[in-house]
Image: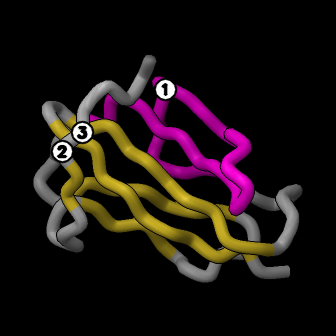
Amino acid sequence: TLFPYTTLFRSNADLQIFPNPVKDLIQIRTVNGEQIEALRIVDGPGRVVFETTQVGGAVSVAGWKQGVYFVEIKLPGKSVHRKIVKSN
């Protein structure tokens, strides 16, 4: 599995995801330069809608349905979780 860690970091100092709410493209950046090892986004019911180990700093959400999504980002030794809102 891509996300074996159980340690969660919720500090805004670890990660920036913007804009939120998002219409077309979200930007994902680590504040301290840590390498993003993997990224997974799930919808409200828990279905994986996006997953990659090739994170380039931005994800297109243009074709997604409006609603709440949960972002899980694997960094070295930890996972960071965020909520985003997709608007039209």
Query: What residue span does the magenta drawing correspond to?
Result: 35-60
Mark 1 crowdedness (10 Å alpha carbons): few <14, some 14-19, many ≥20: few
Q: Nearer the viewer, mark 1 or mark 3?
A: 3
Query: Looking at the image, do the residues carrying marks 1 and 3 touch, with CB atoms under 8 Å apart?
Result: no
Please state which amino acid type lies under the numbered disc 1: Gln
Q: Is residue 4 left or right of residue 62?
A: left
Name, please, the residue furthest toward the top.
1
Give x and y (percent) for residue 14: 19, 60
Query: Looking at the image, do the residues carrying marks 3 and 2 touch, with CB atoms under 8 Å apart?
Result: yes
Residue in the picture at 11% in, 54% down: 32
Q: Does residue 42 show up magenta in the picture?
A: yes
Q: Which mark is residue 6?
A: 3
Q: Out of 48 and 16, give the one closest to the viewer.
A: 48
| Colour approach in the figure | secondary structure
Is label 3 in a helix, a strand or a loop? loop
Mark sitting earlier along the chain (2/1): 2
Viewer can see residue 60 = no
Q: Which residue does the numbered mark 1 point to in the structure image? A: 54
Please state which amino acid type lies under the numbered disc 3: Thr
Q: Which residue does the numbered mark 2 point to in the structure image? A: 7
Q: CA distance from mark 3 to mark 2?
A: 4 Å
Mark sitting earlier along the chain (1/3): 3
Viewer can see residue 13 = yes
Residue in the picture at 25% in, 54% down: 30
